[in-house]
Amino acid sequence: MIREAEQTIVDALVTHLNQGLCQGLEEGLVAAGERAWLEASRRHEGHLPNALGQARHFHSNEQFALALGTAGVEHNPLCGNDIIVGHVGPLMLGRFATSNRKWNNARRSTRRLDLASHNQWLERLVQPGLFGEQAKGAHIAVFFVSVFSGNVRVQPERPLTVEIAVMDTALSECLFRESLTTFLGRYAKPADQPDLVRVRLKTAAKKQQDSQA
């Protein structure tokens, strides 16, 4: 059932997410990390972790909104600390930044928890015995996650990786998780090999066939 659920998720993501959007989000969130560090690094060491976290939020939100807008994806406007949510078909797109050690930042946001609540039907698909009757959902909440080292002295200027994740309703477990670099490889399809072979009879053989006809 886990493989079935993962394939359901992958099929939905590849079908509804434009490859260019994914590339734009990966590049944008990396750039957001770099801008955040440039801004926060001027702060006093005692303020640095807090200043860096805040700068990452604002710059990532701006880049997220920019990438969605460039791809023509509908989303709510930038406003204070509110998270940006994009809508593509059945997919609801959000983002957050977290530490490589613990994926716990997302649970601090009631808005993200509300977004993840749409994935309950996927939980039922993974563990039908736990939830009873299976159900099909209308939406899938997808998060683009900037994963940082969690240490201001270890690559603070950019995420270690940018990942795409579909999480459970508690935002504690990943139903699907993959680096965007790896995920982009799913769009690569083997090129159709045109059949250029043409059967040509040798002249002698053709004459022999003609004489026998």
Image (cartoon, rainbow, N blue to C red):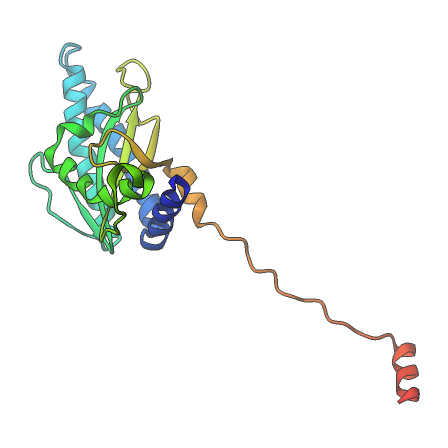
In which image quadrant can residue 24 be found? top left
Q: Does residue 27 show up? A: no
* Quadrant containing the C terminus in the rendered view: bottom right
- How many marks are shown on the rendered structure? 0
In which image quadrant can residue 154 be found? top left
Q: Residue at the left extreme?
A: 80
In terms of depth relative to the viewer, which is nearer, 67 or 34?
67
- Give the image location of residue 198, x and y in percent: 73, 71
In terms of depth relative to the viewer, which is nearer, 61 or 92?
92
Q: Residue at the top extreme?
A: 46
Residue 34's place in the image compared with 4, above or below, is above
Residue 6's place in the image compared with 189, above or below, is above
Name the residue rendered at 31%, 22% in the picture: 100
Residue 103's place in the image compared with 188, above or below, is above
Name the residue rendered at 16%, 36% in the picture: 112
- Give the image location of residue 181, x and y in percent: 41, 38
Name the residue rendered at 12%, 37% in the picture: 111
Residue 142 left/right relative to 213: left
Residue 34 left/right relative to 84: right
Residue 78 left/right relative to 191: left
